[in-house]
Image: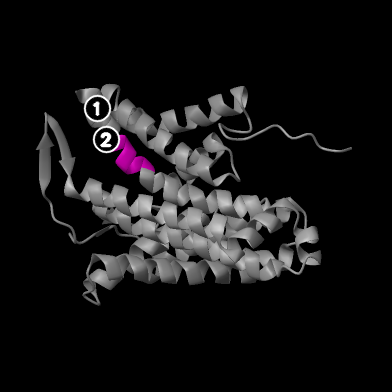
Amino acid sequence: MQFVQQLINGISLGSIYALIALGYTMVYGIMKLINFAHGDIYMIGSYVGFFAITAMGLPFVPAILAAMVMTGILGMVVERLAYKPLRHSPKIAILTTAIGVSLFLEYTTMLALSPQPRTFPHVLDNSVYHIGGLVISFQQIVIFLISVVLMLILTYVVNYTKMGKAMRAVSYDPDAAQLMGINVDKTISFTFCIGSSLAGAAGVLVGIYYNSIEPLMGIMPGMKAFVAAVLGGIGIIPGAMTGGIILGVVEAMVSGFISSTFRDAAAFAILIIILLIKPTGLFGKNEREKV
């Protein structure tokens, strides 16, 4: 019974990791860039949700939509100002810029809002359901359902819309896509917008889950989401979803059966193991490069 309980807890937490990992994997898929600022955009999303609820008095759903809109715009601004001018530069230059953007967002938030943690308001019912010895909270159900709905919407956009086809074409070969009349700049901006919106939603859900937010909260979940993206196969959307769920379940199992202080180490142990055994991730395939 304890195993099933930890499995439920892990799926709830893992669905949040999956939302953040999707942003990592989408940006990597289209630009081959590991956007280290992604975790901080998730942090900004939690603050937008916080102020939407406390200062504007918005209920839960409008607050999460506000966070998604604001972080989507922020993602496009970051891409236009920081990454677009370096698009044809060496990868190390863009990677270094991503780290700089991450630090800029963290310490600007500290300066503007103070480094003190803030208690996220209770916007969901605290009901707890007992089912055959299992304990499931209403918050866990809502977090899981919202994550699934957002992942289904993203899957539809990528697979069945014109912009989704453009995203896949640009991720495969940007030069060929441009020759076929696809606006590469617009497609990349849209990808950043979608990925950042999902991170913003995850920020609000984490605020509800842990009941606390602070300016450096994006560092560890961001790194874990990166691990989830690598675990599933970075650049592959179903892989990011699966990797996030697996990571959340492993963390819950480690917390429940070993020690909660070891759960972060377990996440990075997974990264090392997957890089040693299958560097392309669970869904990745080996590709030969022409010399």
Q: Is residue 13 magenta?
A: yes
Q: Position of residue 85 (x, y in %)?
A: 72, 68
Name the side, left or right, on which 64 lies relative to 108: left
Q: Mark 1 sits on what residue?
A: 4
Q: Nearer the viewer, residue 91 or 65?
A: 65
Contact, CB < 8 Å: mark 1 with mark 2?
yes
Q: Secondary structure at mark 2?
A: helix
The picture quadrant where one finds residue 146 is bottom left
Q: Nearer the viewer, residue 12 or 104?
A: 12
The quarter of the rendered structure image containing the C terminus is top right
Q: Is residue 82 visible?
A: no
Q: Position of residue 19 (x, y in %)?
A: 43, 50
Circle 1: is it few (<14), some (14-19), or many (20+) Cα within 10 Å? Answer: few
* Stretch of the chain drawn in magenta: 9-14
The picture quadrant where one finds residue 31 is bottom right
Distance between the alpha carbons at the discs numbered 1 and 2: 6 Å
Numbered circle sitting on residue 8 = 2
